[in-house]
Amino acid sequence: MDDVVLRGPLIADGTGAPAYQADVGIKDGVISSIGTPVSATRSIDADGLVLAPGFIDMHSHSDLRVLAEPGHLAKVSQGVTTEVLGQDGLSYAPVDDEVLATLRGQLAGWNDDPPGFDWNWRSVGEYLDRLDRGIAVNAAYLVPQGTLRMLVVGWDDRRPTESEMDTMKSVLARSLAEGAMGMSSGLTYTPGMYADTSELVQLCEVVGQHNGFYSPHHRSYGAGALEAYAEMVDVSKRSGCALHLAHATMNFPVNKGKAPELLALLDDAMAGGADISLDTYPYLPGATYLSALLPSWATEGGPDRALARLSDVDTRERIRAEIEETGSDGCHGVPVDWDSIEINGVRNDRNAHLVGASVHASALRLGRAPADLYFDVLIDERMGTSCLMHVGHEENVQAIMKHPAHTGGSDGLLVGDRPHPRAWGTFPRYFARYVRELGVLSLEECVEHLTGRAAKRLRLTDRGLVREGYAADLVLFDPETIADTATFDEPRQQATGIPYVFCNGVTVIDDGTATGSLPGHSLRSRP
């Protein structure tokens, strides 16, 4: 007798093939039968619902939230059963005590710094062991190149010595052997951005030797975006390492309508044998921490030295000129438009009045220059502030999501007063807006993008498809009512039309309600 049988769903199996109707049995955490009449302890009437593999979030920032709040409602409620952590070159393993202390402050705008939290790991293997204590979803991890550089080289803007390079490669190899799926970079964030192409190639050679992939947030999504993408393709070719482009898009006014140029670049590389995939989120604004707009030289040496520069009158004016007039590398080479930068999370209650408004609007209301307000907020918050960047283009979003190398990633931050709604709404929004409303993708295509393709990139041989013997990571949704309800004003809203979600055969959403079960675990690379 099976544990559960799903009666009569329309199965979109993750391959892109036409959906079909059949009963599905679940037993001992796996899909035990498809189309064969079975008896089970529990029977769920799934007539009128679509059964799909659980969605795979290829770009997640749940590194701490999935531990601090392991029920993880934001993700399980939208049908996510696997997340890829360690993104944008900055996360919490591998570290030593000093690096961890720095990261806790630097990444507070992304992940918070929960009081009383047990930081009982330092290596990647120990972090994955911590995940295995019990979480609601499965999680894979990428070695963050910025953290790796911080650990070995520090915060200096220089090339590593030969000895330091050997150490980085050794720590990277050990982290991959402990289970990391690949390596990420954040090449507009310090200190990862200090790595030149040659350094990245050497690290990616190690990743390729371990059958992993490289997932870069490249050097520019604004001015010079195509050149930045081309550099990543070059790194992949020279190193022999598979490439997965993180939140791949073309942003800022300079790139309006230029997605076809990016896709032509990728198509040419893939025609030549390159192994390339990418992920996107179905929204126009991006999100990051507010200090990311600073030029890289202003943050060299770490947060304390950066704060000292912000407090120096002459240095502050130099930073202002670069941000507002020439365009800093932290702001993708584009002069900042303070109207497009919205503060959406602060650490200090005294700054709560800034949340939900652009830097320009708040400065106007307070009778201040936008740059001065920006600098003073960073100082007062010790750079632990998050922001939205309203810089996207709908035509670029749609063009990229139709590409055969496309997968889905939320890039969602789960903390802050008004986090980006993509943290709660990415996957249902694909179906509500881009399948049902606009018809950009068919239902079967969309399921494939969000499941089977992502599982292939992660080299998961037992997940990402509705197939007998595969792990029962499954989502049942109503194709007529599935929708994101999270908004920029009310971002923590559970999606509609997703009554059942299973992770490893255990119900984590049951009739629309979270069960609190924690059946997830780390997904580790295989030698």
Image (cartoon, rainbow, N blue to C red):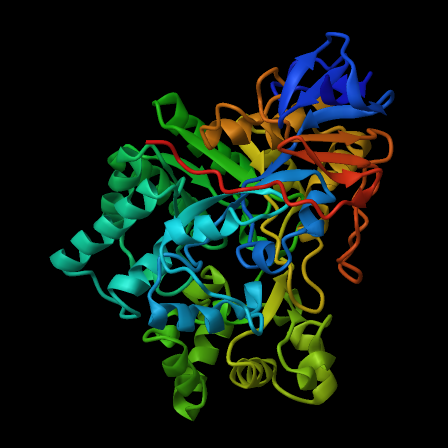
Residue 410 or 112: which is nearer the viewer?
Answer: 112
Which residue is drawn at the image coordinates 58% and 21% (left, top)?
470
- For this view, does 260 lie left or right of residue 273? right
| Quadrant of the image containing the C terminus | top left
Vertical placement of residue 86 versus 511, above or below: below
Which residue is drawn at the image coordinates 68% and 58% (left, top)?
420
Give residue 202's position: percent from left, percent from top: 22, 45
Q: Is residue 479 visible?
A: yes
Give residue 460's position: percent from left, percent from top: 48, 28
Q: Quadrant of residue 99?
A: bottom left
Vertical placement of residue 323 versus 135, above or below: below
| Quadrant of the image containing the N terminus | top right
Q: Is residue 442 visible?
A: no
- Outermost top residue: 36
- Outermost bottom residue: 313
Which residue is drawn at the image coordinates 60% and 84% (left, top)?
373
Total numbered labels placed on residues in the image? 0
Give residue 16's position: percent from left, percent from top: 63, 18
Vertical placement of residue 237 versus 76, above or below: above
- For this view, does 166 lie left or right of residue 136? left
- Outermost left residue: 162
Q: Quadrant of residue 519?
A: top right
- For this view, does 317 lie left or right of residue 376? left
Give residue 298's position: percent from left, percent from top: 38, 76
